[in-house]
């Protein structure tokens, strides 16, 4: 049985812990280094639970295939077969060009031998309130801040924003306010793409430029990466600039892992 | 018992559902239960996982954790001032 003195001491200890906790949070809201330290501790402690939750979520999703009707599965297989055939044709057409491109670059002593770090996605939007994904590749795997993150080789989705021992946060190029230098392949013009959040990006260009919808948008540099395709074009007669809206080239819910370019 | 069940629900929302459902649950449980500090911890998990250095005050711990703390504190004050007769 607890005495009233023990109860008083317990309450006092609880109060002290609460004050310390509140002080750390308030300090973390104003100081970035404290926020980083707290984040590092919380992410390191909680990420195994996120990973297990993903595993169980995946298992439940797989089980749902047993329950699905045969007809819907046949339909899906048919649709995927048609898509696969289409992509195979596209690949055959692109292959000679890719080889020619590599040969030309080799001629100018520019090789594109890249090493990647594979990171499984622990959390992604819409679980995340911002355009951020958390992957299980961190300092121990060789990830560093600023490295580019790719969904597939040649398809860029973001950059590494924060690195912890076993996890990293990847800030997507569509993160609100994030700026990326891009190149519009068809129009052969450089531009600045600004993230709008929710996987959307925007480019502002003078209305005098003729932009075609569906054109590829690449990163700048010798070895460009795909960042999207021109989607909606908003032209306002009262505004000298037109808005080019596009989305990330991949559906984030369809990828399980990302490649971090070394 | 009811509170533990709600904690489990909150954890499940945190791990499996979009952030706004977890945020709504934190708000609801902070109003229902007195001193719901579990909600503040859940908000801290959201902020720790998804905030990055480039974000402003609002995007750091100021987005979920601080508002959750204020909510728990205000809920305590309001709770002490009102009396409900069933």
Image: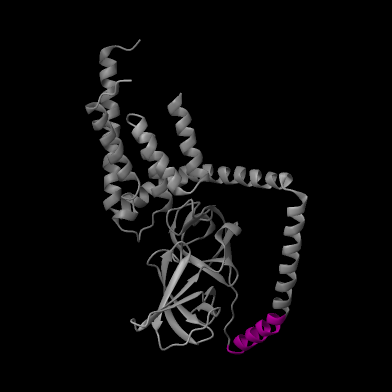
**Residue under the point 27% across and 31% down:** B76
Q: Position of residue A259 (x, y in %)?
A: 57, 63
Left or right of B32: which side holds A99? right
Q: Position of residue A251 (x, y in %)?
A: 57, 62
Can residue A148 be seen by looking at this rendering? Answer: no
Q: Which quarter of the picture shows residue A105?
A: bottom right
**Residue under the point 64% across and 83% down:** A102
Q: Is residue A148 above or below residue A39?
A: below
Q: Is residue A95 magenta?
A: yes
Q: Is residue A121 magenta?
A: no
Seen from the viewer's position, the closer of residues A9 and A111 is A9
Can residue B35 be seen by looking at this rendering? Answer: yes
Type of secondary structure dominating the magenta stretch? helix
Left or right of B14: which side holds B83? left
Seen from the viewer's position, the closer of residues B74 and A237 is A237
Magenta stretch, residue numbers: A93-108
Q: Position of residue A112 (x, y in %)?
A: 59, 77
Q: Which quarter of the picture shows residue A106?
A: bottom right
């Amino acid at each position: 049985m607890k005495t009233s003195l023990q109860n008083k001491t317990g309450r006092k200890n609880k109060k002290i812990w609460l004050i310390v906790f509140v002080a750390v949070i308030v300090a973390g809201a104003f100081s970035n280094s404290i926020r980083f330290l707290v984040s590092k501790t919380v992410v390191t402690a909680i990420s195994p639970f996120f990973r297990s939750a993903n595993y169980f979520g995946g298992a439940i999703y797989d089980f749902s295939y047993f329950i699905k009707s045969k007809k819907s599965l046949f339909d899906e297989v048919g649709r995927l077969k048609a898509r696969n055939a289409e992509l195979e044709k596209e690949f055959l057409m692109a292959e000679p060009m890719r080889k020619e491109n590599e040969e030309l670059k080799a001629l100018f002593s520019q090789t594109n031998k890249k090493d990647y770090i594979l990171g499984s996605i622990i959390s992604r939007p819409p679980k995340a309130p911002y355009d951020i994904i958390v992957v299980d590749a961190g300092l121990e795997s060789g990830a560093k801040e600023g490295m580019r993150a790719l969904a597939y080789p040649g398809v860029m989705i973001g950059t590494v924003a924060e690195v912890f021992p076993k996890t990293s946060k990847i800030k997507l190029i569509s993160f609100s306010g994030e700026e990326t230098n891009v190149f519009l392949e068809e129009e052969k013009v450089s531009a600045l793409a600004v993230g709008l959040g929710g996987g959307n990006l925007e480019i502002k260009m003078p209305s005098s430029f003729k932009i075609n919808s569906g054109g590829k948008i690449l990163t700048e540099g010798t070895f460009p990466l795909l960042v999207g395709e021109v989607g909606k074009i908003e032209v306002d007669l009262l505004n000298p600039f037109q808005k080019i809206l596009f989305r990330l080239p991949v559906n984030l819910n369809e990828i399980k892992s990302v490649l971090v370019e070394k | 018992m009811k509170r533990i069940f709600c904690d489990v629900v909150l954890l499940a929302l945190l791990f499996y559902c979009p952030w706004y459902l977890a945020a709504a649950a934190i708000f609801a449980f902070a109003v229902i239960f007195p001193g719901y500090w579990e909600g503040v911890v859940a908000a801290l998990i959201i902020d720790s996982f998804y905030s990055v250095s480039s974000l402003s005050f609002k995007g750091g711990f100021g987005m979920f954790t601080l508002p959750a703390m204020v909510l728990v504190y205000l809920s305590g004050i309001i709770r002490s001032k009102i009396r409900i007769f069933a």
